[in-house]
Image: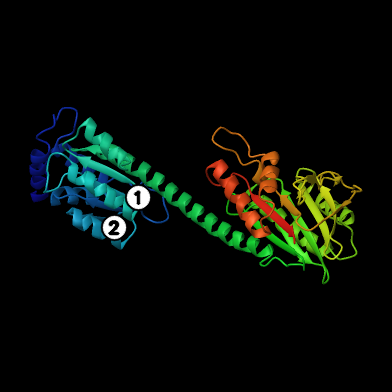
Amino acid sequence: MSLLMSIMKAEMIEGAALPMSGFPTARDRIDGAMETLLDPITVEHSAPPRALIADDQPAILEALRLLLKQHGYEVETAGSPAALIRSLESRVFDLLLMDLNYTRDTTSGQEGLDLLSRIRALDQALPVVAMTAWGSVELAVEAMHRGVGDFVLKPWDNDRLLAILRAQIEQGRTRRRTRQLESEEKSELLEARQIQRGLLPREIPQLAGYEIAGAWQPAHLVGGDYFDVFELGASRAALCIADVAGKGMPAALLMSNLQAMVRGSAFAALEPKALCAKVNSIIRANTGSEKFVTLFYALLDGPAKRLVYANGGHNAPVVVHADGSHERLSDGGPLLGVFPEWNYGQSDVELSSGDRLVLFTDGVTEAANSQDEEFGEERLIGLVVEHRRLGARDLQSKILEVVAAFSDGPFRDDATLIVVAVK
C-alpha cells in the first residue's frame, strides 16, 4: 500500500501541469502493471536486455523496475543525473529510460536535455527513451534532436511503453551490430592497406645517371593502382605501372595478384611485349573478361639511354625532352584480361640528358574541380614542360601538389606516379 500511495503522490506532483484526460490514472497504471506482471515474458533474446532507468522519484523507479523485470529485463536504476552517468561509465546497457526533470529544474526538462550530450559521449549507440509529465511539442522535438529515440508522457500506458522499449532495443542492437561490423571492416581494411603497401617498392632502386621516384595515393584505404621499379642486372631496370578495374577490396586483391604475376614473369631476357602477353593470358584465364587491367611495362637500359616498352591499354606516359618537346608512349595493345590471347607490340625511345619521363594512372588526370572539370592530360603535360628542370622527386611532388590544389580536396580515384629524370 505504501508503494501505491507513493506513486499516486508522485503522479499528483509531476502530473499537475498536464491534463489527465486520455491517460490512465495512477490506480489504472498500477492495476495495469499488476496485470502485465502476470503476462509471460515477451522479449525474445538469448541474453536478457539490460535496461537503465533514471528518475528522481523512488516510487516511479520501483514501478518501472518491477514492470521491466517481470518482462525479462535486467534492470538497474539511477536516482540522479550523477548516478546515471556513473552507471553508464561502468557498464553497457541495451536501453536507457530516463526522466527529463530532476531536482534542479522540475518543469522545463532542460536538466535532462543537458544530460543527453554527456550520455551520447559515453555511448553513441545507446537507445534513449525519455519520460516526463511536463510534456510539450517543443521539448519532444528538442529531445529527438539530441538523440532521444522515443518520447513517453507520464502517466504511461504499460503496453505502449513495453512496445516502445522493445522497438528501441532492436534498433539499438542493430546499430551496435552495424558499428561493430564497420569497425571490424575498417580494421581489416587497415591491415589490407599495410599488406598492399608492402607489395610496393619500399625504396626505389636508382641507376647511375638517373633519378627515379614513385608515389602511390589510394583514394580509399586500399586501391587498384600498382607500380613497381626493380633492377634487372647492374645497369638495367624494369618500370611498371598499372590500374586494375574497380575500387576497394576486389581491385586490391587483383592488384596483389598482378604484382605477383609481373614479378614472377619478369627477367632480363623477356621483352615487354612478351610479358604483357603472358600476364594477359593469366588474368583472362583466372578472372574472366569482366575484370581487366591497364598495364605499362618498360625496360630501361641505363648506359644506352634506351627505353623499350609495351603499353597494354594504359594512359600513355609522356617523355618531355630538354628542349620542351614531348612524345607519348602508346604502342602495345589492348587492356589485359579482355582477350584470351593477344600478340602485343612494343616500341622504344631514345632518352637524352635533361629528359623527364612521367608514368601516371587516370586518378591524376581525371581529378576534377568543383565545376567537374578534369585536370586532364594536356594540363599535366604542360605542367611537366614548365617544371622539366626539376629532379624526379621534386617534379613528382609538384605534380601531386598542383593536382590536389586543382581538385580542392582528396583524390577521388587512386593516383599513382613514376617519374624518371635523366641527368
- Residue 72 visible, this orientation: no
Which x, y percent locates residue 160? 29, 37
Task: Name the residue that disc number 1 marks.
Answer: 126
Give whichever of 88, 16 is nearer the camera.
88
Which x, y percent locates residue 90? 29, 63
Give whichever of 269, 207 is nearer the camera.
207
How far apart are labels 2 and 1 at the CA level? 10 Å
Q: How many marks?
A: 2
Q: Quadrant of residue 12?
A: top left
Q: Is residue 381 above or below residue 91?
A: above
Q: How is the image coloured?
A: rainbow
Determine the secondary structure under disc 2. helix
Q: Left or right: 15 with respect to 150?
A: left
Taking the view exactly as shown, the residue that stands out farthest to the top is: 21
Rendered residue at 61%/34% (across/down) = 373
Rendered residue at 64%/52% (across/down) = 223
Rendered residue at 67%/59% (across/down) = 391
Task: Name the residue that disc number 2 marks.
Answer: 88
- Residue 278 visible, this orientation: yes
* Residue type for callout 2: Leu
Residue 179 — which label? none
Which x, y percent locates residue 370? 54, 35
Asked whether disc 2 touches disc 1, contact meaning CB atoms under 8 Å apart, the reply is yes
Q: Quadrant of the C terminus?
A: bottom right
Q: Quadrant of residue 254?
A: bottom right
Rendered residue at 75%/45% (across/down) = 315
* Residue type for callout 1: Leu
Taking the view exactly as shown, the residue that stands out farthest to the bottom is: 234
Query: Within 10 angstroms of label 1, few (less than 14), some, or many (20 or more) residues?
Result: many
Determine the secondary structure under disc 1. loop
Which x, y percent locates residue 349? 85, 52
